[in-house]
Structure formats: structure tokens, C-alpha cells
Image: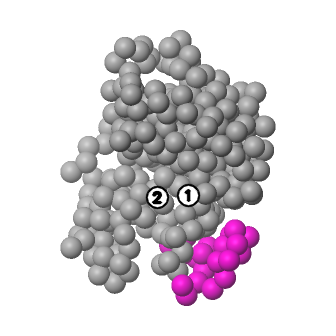
Amino acid sequence: MVLSANDKSNVKAVFGKIGGQAEELGAETLDRMFHAYPQTKTYFPHFDLSKGSAQVKGHGKKVAAALVEAANHVDDIAGALSKLSDLHAQKLRVDPVNFKLLGQCFLVVVASHHPALLTPEVHASLDKFLCSVGTVLTAKYR
Amino acid sequence: MVHWSAEEKQLIAGVWAKVNVEECGAEALARLLIVYPWTQRFFDNFGNLSSPTAIIGNPKVRAHGKKVLTSFGEAIKNLDNIKGTYSKLSELHCEKLHVDPENFRLLGDILVIVLASHFGREFTPACQFAWQKLVGVVAHALARKYH
């Protein structure tokens, strides 16, 4: 799937508006994912996943930063996330299905915090963007 | 039979009581057709679906969205027998409508996003869990009679 010029512009616009709260949104995305899809917790047996966990906040910050990075290099997401892609393939090996779940929760977070921002067209672009990120991160799995 | 905790039932009912079925249904279906354009394949006779604006304004989309979400309401009234509630609809979607069940999952996820956009903070993680569970159960029930 290819991001059109319109998609890229929509993605940049969204992250331009939410980039400042990326950490907070990243943490909430993870929190929602662990709640809505408990199987995702299996990747974090070493984490304290209770409410307000510093580890979840820290990890949310990392996830958000990666999304921001991808948005800032939306013309070359594969290049921007190359090292992360290696990490996921060699070490983390998160099953590909989970990126969709994370994506869903990120969209829910954006929708609940910025409903006016998430018009149907922007929703479509963001969904495509998140799919692309997931594809890049799992590209080297086999 | 699916088990629903008292809390889950409360979270579902609490949100549902405030949902404008017509608006929400129309929005969810429109977003499905916009975000996943291949789903338009089932709606050749709906007229103009050529752009997001056309889709959102399309009266057939609105009407059908309302129909779909109204049916959802039946599941909510019968949480303890969603399978039974959707038995005939499942046969219909398989035998007459030929809809890939994956589409039920897509629509369910979109509905959750629409609810989040309407309810904001009130749509807590616990709330999202209950609703993701509900849309999953509905999707499963609608796929159950496929053969």
C-alpha cells in the first residue's frame, strides 16, 4: 500500500498538532492496548503494567517517538525505522498481528483526544500510515 | 455462551444509552467505506461513492448505517444470546449477501473509534475493552453460520 501525497500531508498535519503530547498519547495507547487486548501483555512480563506505571510511560514515550520519526520521514519510513525493524526481527519478534492492535488503540486515543482532527479522510490516511509502520517493522521477519 | 461481567454490561449499556443510533451508524458505515474503500464492493447500487464527501452525504449510506447500528442494539439487548440473535442475519450475510466476515471486524473497529470520538475521556480503557469485546462477539456471531 502506498501513501498518496494527500495521505502524507494529512499525517504530517496530525503529528504537527499532537507531536507535543506524543509521550502522553503513547502511554495511553499502550495502556488501552493492554486493557483491550490482554494478550499483548505477554510481551511485557518484565514490566509493571499497573495504572500509572513508569515503565509503561517510558515505553509509550519510545513508541510515540518512533511514530513521530516515521511521520517526519514519511517519504522513507523504511529508512527512518530501519534499526527498529532490525530490532523487531532479531530480538523482539512481536507477532505481526499486534501492530494492528496497537494501531487501533492509537486511533482510539487520537479520536478521544482530538475528535475534530480525525475526519474520515485523516482517519483513512492515519490508518494507512500505521499499517505502513507495522509493515516496515515486520519486513525483515523472514 | 459469552460471559459478561456486571461491569462490562454497565459500560456497554451506559454508552449505548447516549448513542444517537442514526448519526453514529451513518458515521461508522461512511468511515468504513472511506477508510477501507474495498468495502464499497458490496454497495454498487448505492449511487455516488466517489469521494469522502459523496459518501458522507449519501442518503443510502446513512440509511444503511442506521439499519446496521439498530441491529447492533438487538445484540446489546440480548448480550446473553448474541449467537441466537444473529443466527438468521448470519445466514443472510453468507448465502445472499456474500460478505467476507473480515468486514464485520473492520466495521466493529471503526465503530469503537467513532464512539471514542464522541465520548472522549468518558470512553475509558475499560470501556474500550468492553466494546472491543462486544464488536468481536458480534462479528463472530455473524460469521457463525457461514458454510
Region of the chain picked out in magenta, as a range: B44-67
Q: Residue B20: percent from the left, percent from the top?
A: 60, 59
- Label 2: element kind: helix
Q: Which residue occupies the foreground of this view, A80 or B3? A: A80
> Are there few (<14), some (14-19), or many (20+) residues within 10 Å of tag 1?
few
Q: Residue A44: percent from the left, percent from the top?
A: 38, 21
Q: Residue A122: percent from the left, percent from the top?
A: 70, 53
Q: Amino acid at mark 1?
A: Met
Q: Determine if the magenta segment contains residue A1.
A: no
Q: Residue at x 35, y 78 (%)?
A: B98
Mark 2, residue position: B106
Mark 1, residue position: A1
Residue B59 appears in which quarter of the rendering?
A: bottom right
- Same chain, labels 2 and 1: no
Dot 2 falls on which chain? Answer: B
Q: Residue at x 25, y 64 (%)?
A: B144
Q: Amino acid at mark 2?
A: Leu
For the stretch drawn in magenta, the main secondary structure is helix
> Going by the image, does A20 lie left or right of B23?
right
Is residue A81 positioned above or below A13 on the image?
above
Q: Residue at x 56, y 18 (%)?
A: A57
Residue B12: mark in rendering: none
- Any part of residue A8 in sight: yes
Q: Residue A112: percent from the left, percent from the top?
A: 64, 41
Q: Which of labels 2 and 1 is toward the front? A: 1
Q: Quadrant of the N terminus of chain A?
A: bottom right
Q: CA distance from mark 2 to mark 1?
A: 17 Å
